[in-house]
Amino acid sequence: MTDIGPALGRRLRHYAAAVWAENIKEWKLELTYKADFARSLIDPVVYLLPYLLYGVALVGGRQSANLEKLVGTSDLVTFVTLGYIFIGFLNMALWAMGFSLRKEQYYGTLESVFAAPVPRWVFTMGMSAHSILHQLLMIVVQIVFIMLVFSLTIKPAGLLPSLGIVGLMLIAMYGIGMLMASLTLIFKQGWLISEALASILMVITPIAYPLAVLPVFLQKAALVVPTTYGILTVRHFLLGERLGFSIADAFLRVALLGVVWVSFGLVVFTLIDKYTRRSGTLSHY
Amino acid sequence: MNLTSQLRVVWAEFRKTTAIWLSYPALVFFWAIFPLLWVFPYVFQGKALVGSMSSAAFEHLTGSGNYLAFVMIGAMVSTFIFSGLWGVGNSLREETYWGTMEYIIASPTHPLVVLIGKTVAEAAWTSLMVVFQAVVIGSFFGVQFTLAKVLPVLLLIGLLMVGFYGFAIAFAGFTLLIKEVHGWVHTLEWVFFLFSPIRYPVEVHPVTRLVSTLIPLTWALVAIRGIMLLNRREVNLWPTVLVLVLMDGVLLWAGYFLFVALERKTRRDGTVGMH
């Protein structure tokens, strides 16, 4: 009994070192292509602007009376910008983690990674650690630009609870990332899976609109996506968007989704990992 | 190498690209369906901000308040642009990943001929998908495709494709030089989204209105929407055709010379096989 504690501690330190090493490896790879890195910081701003300009073209300004009727705020620029930030977190799970194994395959290092003496989830956690840091950097650039150009009006008191719900949401997103990473082992053309799921999630997640405008079946589907609660709750804290549930409910549901998605992601990953090894298709393209 | 041999290479490349497409049937399904799906967030955003399917402010800018048809037509036409960017612009980078780039460079064919083969294949496949999208839009979203509308639209799309594929060939040369271009393709995608009226009327802001005039897609989309949504058949068509022909000439010329220069530089530097 007395040996379990130190052994577990050693193992966790070993895993933490592997996660950190993976994170550093990704940063080194990324910074090797400096122009590409600089571009990745500008991209989120360019991504966001069509949504804002489209909104302005629709209502002839930045205030929408219909949006106010639906959610209690009329400022479409702040509303859409806060929602759009979460696309970065979706991308983290769907692209950075989901596509990670396919990238290793392209590099010719997938077999070496899989032969390393750490579980696979440690490898994908390292990828997600890098991706979270990268996303945070992109969000800072995005918010600074929008602040300067459009002057966002948010409630500063809502920042801390917003970070709380985002932190919980990230755990659930890790589960989705594990699921995506495993699917690329079977379907190989990983970008297609990521792009297809990203396209569907972009529709059902209330990024630039409230849930109420979606058809009922899509509203129900949105409730199993962690970013739905992330967006709605953060916009509630920072902008005063009306919620269809209590704040306690929001935290509880995201925590529950975290347990469900992480468990599901790990189970599917383990099964697919075993299958690809047994069938000898790990290195297939 | 004579013309017949070069045409044989183009045909072989066409068959190879087609074989790769058919090896991943999901790809065909994806490019046929998803460009339309990407439009739905804009439809729901419109519903949330306006409360109906027509916007007076939008009509003031575009002549039509039907924002659903506006974004659907944008999605359909832009399929050519994005498949060109990925299928032609990124194609030599893919050959590097597959480990076949050195064989292409070492073969007695100029890489430009190989690239033309890829371009022809990409154009054929994309046209098929856009026809499918047009059927979906015509059947479910109330946009009418009569013969009188389709013919001038085809002319505009043809001119748009010629110029854009010239640009994509130059971009393929760029990939030989800087290697990792996946992110740059995404950035270019979004530059098109931002500075051409794919998803919103660029007239809404003076900067986007000004920059958009340099992009052939803007001219083509404005004319196509004029024909499809406002029933303007002749008005403004010929000036647009003239502008597109001039832009095509510049883009094809620049695309050819840039590709040849960049390919020569890569060979001379000995960096063809580098990642």
Image: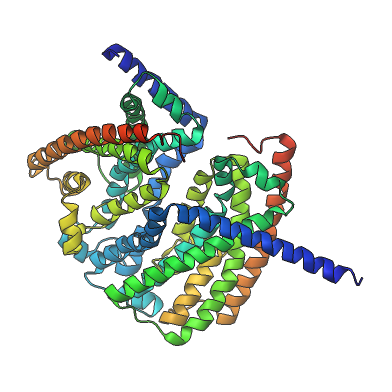
Occupied quadrant, residue A72:
bottom left
Occupied quadrant, residue A127:
bottom right
Q: Left or right: where does residue B189 sit relative to residue A177?
A: left
Q: Decide: is A138 above or below B193.
A: below
The image shows residue A274 at horizontal and vertical percentages of 74, 44
The image shows residue B234 at horizontal and vertical percentages of 8, 40
Residue furthest to the right in view is A1
Residue furthest to the front in view is B269
Along the viewing direction, whichever of B53 and B237 lies nearer the viewer: B237
The image shows residue A98 at horizontal and vertical percentages of 56, 52
Residue at 50% in and 33% down: B98
Along the viewing direction, whichever of A199 and A25 lies nearer the viewer: A25
Q: Decide: is A63 above or below A126.
A: below
Residue at 40% in and 77% down: A71
Q: Which quarter shows the C terminus of chain A?
A: top right
Q: Left or right: where does residue A284 sit relative to residue A30?
A: right
Residue at 33% in and 60% down: A46
